[in-house]
Image (cartoon, rainbow, N blue to C red):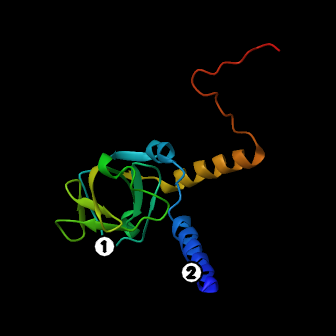
């Protein structure tokens, strides 16, 4: 009896670890994407979605294949819903057209408003993120003090 209990305990803990591993926090690169994003658009015509990824608490990037990559800002109701690997689905009134009045469904449950959509220059984003990663590896990133912290200037 004790062996069965231990077995199920190990199975449950392993399941929890595996389940949580894909839902970890995401690194917020929203500022980089916003820096290289164009003006807001009202709609995007597309043939297919090739890929997507969260890039912060408020934004996802969707690769619409030939149409390019778009930064989508989601409504506040979904800011805490994005994680490393959410399942996303487009809930659109028009097939093959994403409109700011449409919704993005996160994890099959949460209906998220689209606040804004912008085309992104992914070549510029990749170059800047590669520079950031290089700086981190070389230890060149300056970490500013938190608010209220001041340098003592003395002993």
Mark 2 to mark 1 CA distance (whole Å): 46 Å
What residue lies at 76% left-to-right and 42% top-to-bottom? 139
Q: Please provide percent x and percent y for residue 111.
A: 26, 59
- Left-right relation of 109 to 16: left
Q: Is residue 26 visible?
A: yes
- Left-right relation of 132 to 65: right
Say which residue label 2 marks.
8
The image quadrant where one finds the C terminus is top right
Q: Give residue 10's quadrant in the image.
A: bottom right
Count of marks overlaid on the render: 2
Say which residue label 1 marks.
47
What residue lies at 56% left-to-right and 66% top-to-bottom? 21
Compare marks 2 and 1 and give the one earlier in the sequence: 2
User: Height in image: 125 above or below 148?
Assistant: below
Residue in the foreground of this view, choosing between 141 and 110 = 110
What label sits on residue 131 in the rendered view?
Answer: none
Residue in the foreground of this view, choosing between 137 and 110 = 110
User: Height in image: 14 above or below 76?
Assistant: below
Q: Is residue 75 visible?
A: no
Q: Please provide percent x and percent y for residue 72.
A: 35, 53
The image quadrant where one finds the N terminus is bottom right
């Amino acid at each position: 009896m004790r062996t069965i209990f231990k077995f199920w305990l190990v199975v449950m803990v392993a399941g929890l670890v595996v389940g949580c591993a894909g839902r970890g926090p995401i690194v917020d690169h929203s500022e980089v994407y916003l820096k290289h994003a164009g003006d807001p658009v009202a709609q995007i015509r597309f043939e297919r979605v090739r890929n997507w990824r969260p890039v912060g608490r408020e934004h996802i990037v969707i690769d619409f294949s030939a149409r390019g990559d778009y930064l989508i800002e989601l409504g506040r109701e979904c800011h805490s819903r994005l994680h490393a690997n959410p399942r996303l689905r487009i809930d659109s009134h028009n097939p093959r057209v994403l409109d700011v009045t449409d919704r993005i469904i996160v994890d099959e449950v949460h209906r998220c408003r689209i606040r804004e959509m912008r085309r992104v220059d992914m070549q510029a984003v990749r170059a800047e993120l590669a520079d950031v990663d290089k700086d981190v590896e070389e230890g060149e990133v300056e970490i500013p003090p938190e608010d209220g912290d001041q340098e003592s200037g003395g002993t």
